[in-house]
Amino acid sequence: MTIQPNRPSVGQLQPSLIRQLANGALGRDDVLPLWFGEPDVPTAHFIRDVAKASLDNGNTFYQANAGHPLLRTALKDYMNCLYATDFVEDNIIITTSGMAAVALATQCVVAEGDHIVTHSPTWPNLPSTPQIMGADLTCVPLRPKDGYWHLDIEELLAACTSKTRALLINSPSNPTGWMLNDAEQQHILDFCRAHDIWLIADEVYSRIVYDRPHAPSFADKITDDDKVLIVNSFSKTWAMTGWRLGWLTIPKSMVTTFEMLVEYNFACVFAPIQLAGVVAVNEGESFVQESVARYKVALDFVTDQLEDLPRVSFPKPRAAFYAFFGVDGVDDSFAFAQEILAKTGVGLAPGIAFGTDGEGYLRLCFASDVERLEQAFDRLKPMLT
């Protein structure tokens, strides 16, 4: 007998197609893994050293629900420096990853039967989280336009109804690299204010942008009275994917609410990880800038390669570190990714993993050394020509 969970929305969850594909390559030492969204370098030593020292000092006890005071202060200062804002510590809640930040924000905002609007293709965890809560979801498609990805903002807003509780926005976007501009953000914010709709903004890729120091953010457009929750993470910016450290920027009047949500979900984040986050924020700016410069070299290389392939259509990303490209004749991206893996040993993420609007596409993470990307394209070209 197969025992099912009591909540139907949990029973309807689907396994990650990316992990399913990667699991099929276990034991192979010839695979070039470009399927997961993470840099190819370990976390910088100056960050690791702080965590090790904290462990050696016996710093293994419970921490405050809202987060270590040093990290909340560091992030408050970081946000204020980056966006010319005036956040205080009570605007910052420390979480075990950006994913946990999304989950807490959703628990706070979404009830069963609520209507949520987002865009697609998108990171699959983003729409799945409100669906776990029993919400109904509408996805508005991103479309290629003038060589880039584009979202029709009026179409997004028109999808909202009287039952719409929240908009979920991931900008810069995984997997497309699409990015809102300031005017579009202001238009969305004004709409949410006028219709009393929450806005959950996933800005995890805000520092991985190639024509400015940071992506446009809702942070510098909101007041403390706005129903806006901004999700961020250490994973991409500081190459700390496995550390599971993130934060929420919230209205400071909600700090007690989020302290309780933290308490009843994971209680606190491990102290050595939080203290490593402090040094990442305070001393890691040169690392961030060097990483983005390296990704830009990789992006230029990948663009040159993909634009030479006759079967490939490649709307260029404005940010993040993914090439999300279509392949003519492919109507089952998972099967095609499996075939590529079997024949070439290159691991790509199937577009269907990011929603039905991603079918026919593949995602390649180019947060990698160009030498490895050269090897990957030497293997891929026969299958994409």
Image: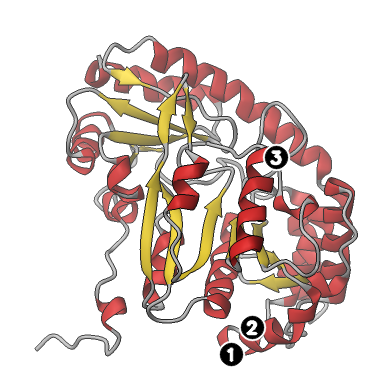
- Graded by Cα atoms within 10 Å as few (under 14), some (14 to 19) or many (20 or more), the crowding at tag 2 reads many
- The amino acid type of the residue labelled 3 equals Asp
Q: Residue furthest left?
A: 1
Q: Give yes or no for contact between labels 3 and 1 (Cβ–Cβ under 8 Å).
A: no
Residue 65 x/y as whole percent: 72, 84
Kindly report which numbered mark, 2 or 3, lies closer to the viewer in this rendering: 3
Q: Quadrant of residue 57?
A: bottom right
Horizontal arrangement in the rendering, residue 357 relative to residue 130 (left or right)? left
- Graded by Cα atoms within 10 Å as few (under 14), some (14 to 19) or many (20 or more), the crowding at tag 1 reads few
Horizontal arrangement in the rendering, residue 276 relative to residue 360 (left or right)? right
Q: Secondary structure at mark 3?
A: helix
- Sequence-earlier tag: 2 or 3: 3
Residue located at (71% from left, 72% from top):
94
Residue beneath label 2, please? Answer: 262
- The amino acid type of the residue labelled 1 equals Tyr
Q: Is residue 31 above or below residue 277?
A: above
- Sequence-earlier tag: 3 or 1: 3
- The amino acid type of the residue labelled 2 equals Val
- Graded by Cα atoms within 10 Å as few (under 14), some (14 to 19) or many (20 or more), the crowding at tag 3 reads some
Q: Quadrant of the N terminus?
A: bottom left
Q: Which mark is residue 244?
A: none
Residue beneath label 1, please? Answer: 264
Q: Is residue 236 something one can see in this rendering?
A: no
Residue 331 x/y as whole percent: 17, 35
Q: Quadrant of residue 117?
A: bottom left
Query: CA gap, disc 1 to disc 2?
Result: 6 Å
Query: CA gap, disc 3 to disc 1?
Result: 36 Å
Query: CA gap, disc 2 to disc 3?
Result: 31 Å
Q: Secondary structure at mark 1?
A: helix
Q: Secondary structure at mark 2?
A: helix
Horizontal arrangement in the rendering, residue 273 relative to residue 121 (left or right)? right
Horizontal arrangement in the rendering, residue 293 relative to residue 68 (left or right)? left
